[in-house]
Image (spheres, rainbow, N blue to C red):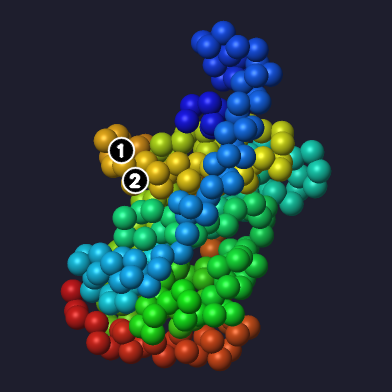
Amino acid sequence: MKVLLYENHTESRSIAKQFDLPQSTVWICFERTIKALSSIADNFINWPSREKRQVIENGFNNKSKLQGVIGAIDGTYIAIKAPRENPEVYINRKCYYAITLQAVCDNKRQFMDVFVGYPSSVSDRRIFVNSDLYRNVTTNVAEYFDENQFILGDKAYPNLKWILSPYIDRGHLQERHKNFNKCHASTRSVVERSFALLFGRFRRLKYLDMCRMDLIPKTVLAACVLHNICLMFADQQEQYYVQEGREFLDQRQARDNVNLEQYNEGVMVADGNARREIIAQNLPRH
């Protein structure tokens, strides 16, 4: 893993010296490892089957009052050095160069879907509607969700029947809406913990000092594959990694999300609003 995520020259020299190898050989090993892990990503990051979705839903139900949740979606920045071509496109609102990682995780913090590579100046909305997940679910929602199932997203995401966002609080929310938002936030926080674990375990994701722009998304994807593998085999250092990653995200990752209250897909939003309101009305009070 160290070789995988430390591609900067200082670290590659250290690895080459440690194993008595030329730096060029270390780079070749790095590139082969990245490509190999990327090629098997579908084996470890995939949308769950109907049976697995039920297991995930039950897992969320045991810890949340929201019934029907099978995942949580969010985006995070991966800081990079200034690209040689069109660098201005990669500058985000926090004024550093980055790409965006969009991910959906389950109740155990394993990634179910990953979409990475868009410049961080692109809004979460645009990334979401251009993602494979959005296109595939829109085409055949029954293949991804049972009738009462959905995922949770923050206010940057549209409120659709299969992805619910919180109510926008302008100081006039009713108690049932505030109650829904509290349950929503506590349940959706699992994806934030997933990112914290990812950054804590693979520290180089805090800043990818790489020149090969074609390898950067593959490197992030490879880290996500290893993240899932580590969770499958119960990594004993997990809590340490989560704490370190959370401290990093708290310092850097305050993201400015776009309010999608006015979303183009009017009918789809109406369906999402109706489902959210029914859930809010029937949700037990804290």
110 shown above or below 150: above
- Quarter of the image where one finds residue 109: bottom left
Residue 211 locus on image (x, y percent): 71, 33
Give the x, y percent position of residue 96.
Answer: 63, 43
Q: Are marks 2 and 1 in contact (CB under 8 Å)?
A: yes
Compared with 141, 281 (above or below) is: below
Q: Residue at x 44, y 87 (%)?
A: 273
Residue ID for mark 2? 231
Is disc 2 placed on a helix, strand or loop? helix
The residue at the point 59 percent across, 80 percent down is 139
Q: Nearer the viewer, residue 87 or 108?
A: 108
- Residue at 54% of width from left, 47% of height from top? 40
Q: Is the residue marked by circle 2 packed among few (<14), some (14-19), or many (20+) residues within 10 Å?
A: some
Q: Depth check: 52 or 84 in front? A: 52
| Residue 202: % across, % down | 46, 36
Q: How many marks?
A: 2
**What residue did someone put label 1 on?**
235
